[in-house]
Image (cartoon, coloured by chain):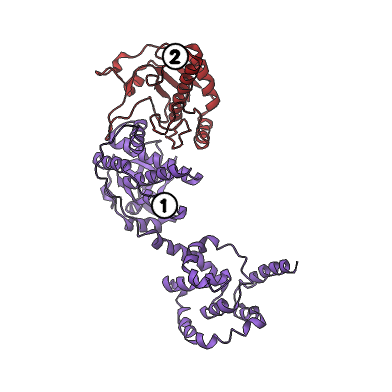
Chain colours: A red, B purple
Amino acid sequence: MIRIVTLATYDEGDITHLSKTLYRSFGVGTEHVGERALPKKAERSDGRFDAIKLLGDASPVRAYSDDKVLYITDKELAIPKGPLGEPPTWGYAEQGGDRALISTFRFKPRGVTEASIEVFRRRLARESIHFIGHLWDLHHCYDARCAMHPSWSPSLPDDPEFELDAFCRDKSERRVRLAKT
Amino acid sequence: MVTVGAVRTLGKRERADKQEEASSPVGNISSSADLKPGDRVVYPKQGVYRVTGLEQKDIAGQRLEFVRMSREEDGASVLVPLGKVATIGLRRVATASDIEGVFHYLGATYGDPELDWKVRHRDNVERLIAGGVLGVAEVVKGLHSLSRLRPLPAKERELYDSSRHLLVNEISVALGVPDVIAEDYVDFALMPPAGVKLPLKTPPIPVELKGPPWKRKKPVVAEDDDLGLAELGIDLSALEGAAEGAAGSEESEEGEGAEGAAPASEEGGEEGEALPAKVVEKVAVVKATVVKAPAPRKAPPPPPKKPAAKAAPVKKPAPKPAPKNAPKKKGMPAKKPAASTPAPPKKGSKPAKGKKK
C-alpha cells in the first residue's frame, strides 16, 4: 500500500487525483494519511532543505511491511554536490526502500484555472510515480515519455506524460508481485 | 541464499582467463593474498561485495579453501575458490578520483555508436567483465547514445538497466551517497539541463579490449563453420570439386549457417560472385578457416591438402564433364563413411518436389 503524507497544505482534490493515479500506475492501494509537521532541522543555511535529512527526520507513519510512504512538501530541496555540480532536485527516495519525498517547489504555479490545475496535478502525479518507482528499484529511463525519465532532462516536455513505459512497467509489476506479503 | 562461485564460473573459466589477459583495469585483484576480511571488492556483473572471511569446505572428497563474500546490496553470499580469485576479474571499488574521471567520461561527447549489434553486445559484455568502472560507464554511455537514435531492443534494454545499476551502485559506494543521488549525478553528466555547462576535463581513456572487433569475430566464424565442414565433407579436394561442380542443389536451402556465414560471406564475396550456390561460399570460408585456425583435430587433414592442391589443376578438367553425370555420384562415394550423408538427400528431395510442381 502507498501512504501519502503531506508536509504542507494541499488541495484535497489534488491528493485524490494523485491517489487514483498511483493506484492505476502500480495497482496498489493508496491512501492519504494526513498532514504532518515539516522537520525544521533539515533546513540549511541557504534556506533550502536537505532532502536526505528531511526524509530521515520526517515523522514516521504506521505502515506494514512492503508499504511505501510518500512525503510531499512545497519547500525547495537540495542534495550533496556531485563531481560535476548539483543536479536540480525534485525529490528523493531510498532506492529499493520504503520512503520517498517529492517537492512541488519547482512545479508551475497551480493557479486557479482548470488548465493550470490540470498541469499541476499531472506533474504531481508524474513526480510521485517517478520517486515511488525508485522505491520499486526502478532506475532512470532514457525514454522522455516515461515517468522514470530524469525530471530536469532537456528532452522532457513542459507537460510531461505520467505513465511508465513498457520496460519500467513490467519491472515495477514484477517487484510489486514479489514484494506482496 | 548461498551461491558457490566455483560452480557458477566453471563454464566460463576460459573466457574469464582470456578476458583477464586482455585487459588490466586499475585495482584488479591478482591474488587471493590481497583479500582481507572487511575489504570491499567489485565482482564483475554482480556488484559490490564485502569479504567476510576464508572458509574450508569438503567438496567431492577434496578440501578446498574459499573466500566468502557478501553482496552489500542484498546480502547474497558467494564462495570463490582461492585459486579462482585471480581469474574472475575481482577488483577494488573505484576511488573518488576514478569516479571523477568516470563523470568526465560520461559528460564528454560520444562518437558514433557501434551499429552491428553482435559486435556491440560482445564488446559490452567484455567491458562489463574486464573494463573496470570505466568499462561499465562506457557501456552505459554507449547504449544511452544509441537510445537517442532509436529505442533499444529488449535484451540491450536489460543490459542498459543492469549496467546502469552496477555503475550507480559502485558510484554510491565510492562517493558515500545514496543510490538515487548517485544516479542523479550520472544523468546530470549524461543529459545536463538546458543552459548548464559542465566543468569537464579530459576524460580518461578506457581499457582497450582484445583487438578490434573484426579480429575477435574470427574464432566465432571458425566455430560455426566447423559444423559446416563436418556436414559438407572430409577432404578439401572433395570440397574443391564440390565448389566447381556441385551446383549447390543439395544444400542450397540450408539456412542454419545463416548467422555464422553472414560475416564470412563478406570474406568469401570475391569467390561468391562467380559461384552461384551458398555451398560455394561455405567452401571458401571453410578453406580460409582451416588455414587460419589450425585445430588439433584438424591436424591430420592438412597433409592431404597439399597433394590435393597440387593435383587440383590435374583434376580440374575432370569435374567439367562431371555435371553431366550429376554431382551426387561423386559426392556419394566420398561421403559413404560419413554419418551426415543421409541428411542431404532428404533436403535435396524437397526442392526436387517443388521443382516438379
Q: In which quarter of the image is residue B246?
A: bottom right
Instruction: Choose mark 2 or mark 1, whichever is in front.
Output: 2
Between the residue at mark 2 and the residue at mark 1, the CA separation in whole angstroms equals: 48 Å
Q: Kindly identify which residue carries mark 1.
A: B114
Bin the neighbour count of mark 2 within 10 Å (Cα to Cα): few under 14, some 14-19, many 20 and up: few
Q: Which of A37 and B50 is in front in this view?
A: A37
Q: Which of B179 and B74 is in front in this view?
A: B179
Disc 2 and disc 1 on one polypeptide chain: no
| The disc label shown at residue A132, or none | none
User: Where B118 falls versus A179 (above or below)?
Assistant: below
Query: Which quarter of the figure is the C terminus of chain B placed in?
Result: bottom right
In the image, A54: left or right of A24? left
Query: Which quarter of the figure is the N terminus of chain B placed in?
Result: top left
Q: In which quarter of the image is residue B342?
A: bottom right
In the image, A88: left or right of B257? left
Number of on-image labels: 2
User: Where A50 falls versus B338 (above or below)?
Assistant: above
The amino acid marked with disc number 2 is: Gly
Subunit bearing disc 1: B
Q: Nearer the viewer, residue B43 or B271?
A: B271
Residue A125 x %, y % = 48, 23
Do the residues bearing badges 2 and 1 touch, measured as CB atoms within 8 Å?
A: no
Residue B276 x %, y % = 58, 71
Q: Is mark 1 on a helix, strand or loop?
A: loop
Residue A30 makes an appearance in the image? no
User: Where B357 falls versus A45 (above or below)?
Assistant: below
| The disc label shown at residue A111, or none | 2
Q: In which quarter of the image is residue B295?
A: bottom left
Q: What element carries label 2?
A: loop
Subunit bearing disc 2: A
User: Where B135 falls versus B247 (above or below)?
Assistant: above
